Image (cartoon, grey):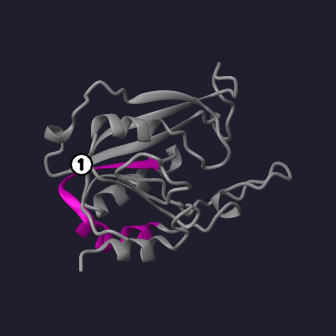
Amino acid sequence: METRKFRVVLADCPWDFDDKLTMSKVRRGAASQYATMGLSDLGLLREQLSPVLEDDALLALWFVSCQAFDGLTLMASWGFEQKQIWTWEKTKKDGTGQAFGMGRIARGCTEHLYVGTRGSITRHVKNKSQRTSFQHPKLPHSRKPDNVHRMLDAMFPGEAKLELFARRPWPVEGWTCLGNQCEGDGRDIRESLQELAPA
């Protein structure tokens, strides 16, 4: 794998999620879908991540509402300062109206990204017309829409971008997509990051 420095990181971490609620025969919770990682193990990735980043870099980190504190903690442990929250507003499959999600208090119909920076990122942003929210139909468990990839491509054209815990390659030049469910990689994230490290 080619050694390079990345301006942008997009991460959809396999958060260790304590949800044992049983309401039907439908499998619930992240652990029923894929191997998860605890906050401390995710934090340790900084050792392998930091050396492959530009001094000026941006992190877009997916989280759900009940993980807000963990998301901020992880962002800080990776060396980024939180600046914005971007929100995916989930619609029905036909693209109309709000989706009807899970939740013990109110039904969740959003997911979010903390967007944080290290160094001075604003001088690298080429397109400043992107919005902090977007609508897209609800998707199967943990799958994310492509909107954020397109936003980051518009904001940082030609810059090297790294996706952690990717489900599939993003077919735009400049992206390196790592994840044990990602075609073209398929390894533990720690092993993949180690290969990116400078010699």
- Is 197 left or right of 98, judged from the image as shown? left
Task: Say which residue appears at 42% left-offset and 45% top-offset.
Answer: 172
Question: Which of 189/173 is in front?
Answer: 173
Can you tell which quarter of the image residue 114 is in? top left
- Classify mark 1: helix, strand or loop: strand
51 drawn magenta: yes
- Is 25 left or right of 144, judged from the image as shown? right
Image position, residue 27 (x, y; %): 77, 55
Q: Amino acid at mark 1?
A: Thr
Image position, residue 183 (x, y; %): 57, 61
- Where 42 sits versus 61, above or below? below
Question: Which of 120/173 is in front?
Answer: 173
Can you tell which quarter of the image residue 94 is in? top right
Question: How many numbered marks, from 0 up?
Answer: 1
The part of the chain drawn in magenta is 39-62
Task: Say which residue appears at 26% left-offset and 66% top-offset.
Answer: 52
Task: Say which residue appears at 61% left-offset and 68% top-offset.
Answer: 35
81 drawn magenta: no
Question: Which of 62/175 is in front?
Answer: 175
Question: Which of 129/75 is in front?
Answer: 129
Image position, residue 59 (x, y; %): 32, 50
Image position, residue 165 (x, y; %): 49, 60
Can you tell which quarter of the image residue 54 is in? bottom left
Q: Quadrant of the C terminus?
A: bottom left
Residue tagged 1: 117
Task: Say which residue appears at 55% left-offset and 44% top-offset.
Answer: 144
